[in-house]
Image (spheres, grey):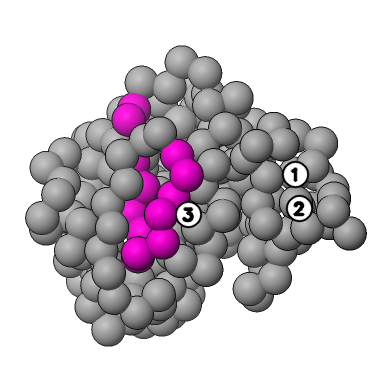
Amino acid sequence: MKIVTVSCDKYADTAPAFSELLYKSWPNCPHELVFVTNSKTLNVSEPVYYLKNNDMSFGWRLRQFIEKHYTDDYLLFMMSDYFVKSINTSVVAQAHELCVLPDVRHVRLRPMPHPQLHYTHPNFGQINKRARYSLSLQPGIWETQVLYDLLKDNENPWETEVQGSTRVWQVGGTFLSVKDVIMPFINYYRKGKADGIEWVRQNVSLENWPEAVQNAKDA
């Protein structure tokens, strides 16, 4: 399993800070971090897969990456503007163990929305696959083929969540979610605008500051 982190040209400045914060929170992370983006160069040392198309071609880009560049049975999905504050790594490991069970297809690592149904493990609940946002782009562990099949080439991230949620009920097996927040993070770009600038200034090295943080310093 790898940590597959999706970015785009508009959010390219977030990748260095994302990488730094992830490893601060998870210094002994056993999973390789890779980025999937459009065309703008990401200033990171990790592998980057450039799949050029419209910046909003989320479904197409992730499907192309899985189809042509990814062979692992599972992936931990992230977005580059999810700036993590901390990670309960033991619960993430539990989620990974659950996801490899024969009946489990996906484990969401942030309870948004909260799981609606009971599950036997105390840290997890079951997602109602007919509920709104049963497909969420919050961090989560996925059976790779399941995520690939749920994506559509013509859908952007918002359409993926809304329209993809209408397809989840067709997937056999169980979708789970953590009950509690185990990976608090700042959603750095909110509706396209930078947020949490002061927090980033205090918690990210100067050389990894996104553009808006650097511009605020220079103003």
Element class at badge 2: helix
Q: Which of 119 and 153 is in front in this view?
A: 153
Q: In this view, does 65 lie to the left or right of 165?
A: left
Kind of residue at badge 1: Val
Q: Earlier in the sequence, mark 1 or mark 3?
A: 3
**Do labels 2 and 1 touch, CB within 8 Å?**
yes
Label the magenta part by its dominant secondary structure: loop
Q: Find residue 141 and report its horizontal and vertical position in percent.
A: 35, 44
The magenta span reads 31-44
Q: Which of 13 and 203 is in front in this view?
A: 13
Residue 39, above or below 185: below
Q: Identify the disc placed on residue 79.
A: 3
Query: Within 10 Å of the Cα at label 2, are there few (<14), some (14-19), or many (20+) other Cα atoms?
Result: some
Q: Find residue 98 and report its horizontal and vertical position in percent.
A: 32, 34
Q: Identify the disc placed on residue 200.
A: 1
Distance between the alpha carbons at the discs numbered 1 and 3 = 16 Å
Q: Nearer the viewer, mark 1 or mark 3?
A: 1
Q: Identify the disc placed on residue 63.
A: none
Task: Name the residue furthest top.
Answer: 28
Kind of residue at badge 3: Met
Q: Identify the disc placed on residue 213.
A: 2
Q: Find residue 101 and report its horizontal and vertical position in percent.
A: 22, 35
Which residue does the image show at 50% across and 58% down from the upper left? 12
Kind of residue at badge 2: Val
Quadrant in the picture for residue 31: top left
